[in-house]
Amino acid sequence: DVAPFAETWVATRGDRIVGAALWLPPAGLPRGSRRDMALTVRLGRLLLGGRNRRGGFRLLAAVEKKHPRVPHWYLAVLGTDPIVRGAGAGSALLVEVLSRADEAGEPAYLETQKEENLAYYERHGFGVRDMVRLEVLPTAWTMWREPR
């Protein structure tokens, strides 16, 4: 199960949750193949819903092959309510953990399927590490951040 190995952070405005991030700390990595499969299936169901599951699972598996095996913070999911996009909720969810990673001298890693997210993550110190492209499926980028 993912829960014991992950940290979930939320951003709020008043009493409303407007963003969330799921981070796996270095102690949760590397994951075993059984945990990898369980995480891939759960993320696939969450992210893909009823859409092109077979292709989505192929993309997730291809991206997972690129996942670094050295200890690092892994941003598995980051999402914000479209109503507050651009207001800093996502950045707050990143900065909190990235500050801890910097203090501990630990790198961070993430994947994204949105090219428009690349510049956003680059502003937080991430750089494109690899690009995963499979036939007609969306492209995915892997990104790495060295501690500051």
Image (cartoon, helix red, strand yellow):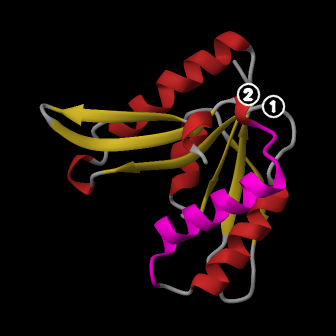
Q: x, y percentage for residue 62?
A: 79, 69
Residues at circles 2 and 1 in contact by the CB criterion of under 8 Å: yes
Q: Position of residue 107 (x, y in %)?
A: 74, 28
Residue type highlighted by circle 2? Ala
Q: Is residue 130 visible?
A: no
Report the quarter where the C terminus lies: top right
Q: CA distance from mark 2 to mark 1?
A: 7 Å
Q: Is 43 one of the magenta-colored residues?
A: yes
Q: Is residue 35 located in the magenta-colored stretch of the structure?
A: yes
- Residue at the image point whose x is 27% and y is 56% from the top: 82
Q: Which residue is mark 2?
A: 27
Residue 30: x %, y % from top left: 81, 40
Give the residue pinned by disc 1.
71
Q: Which residues are magenta?
A: 29-50
- Counting labels gives 2
> SS at mark 1?
loop
Quadrant housing residue 72: top right
Q: Residue furthest left?
A: 14
**From the viewer's perspective, is 8 left or right of 24?**
left
Please state which amino acid type lies under the numbered disc 1. Pro
Image x and y of residue 71, in percent: 81, 31
The residue located at (51%, 45%) in the rendering is 120
Whether 41 is drawn above or below 16: the answer is: below
Q: Earlier in the sequence, mark 2 or mark 1?
A: 2
Q: Nearer the viewer, mark 2 or mark 1?
A: 2
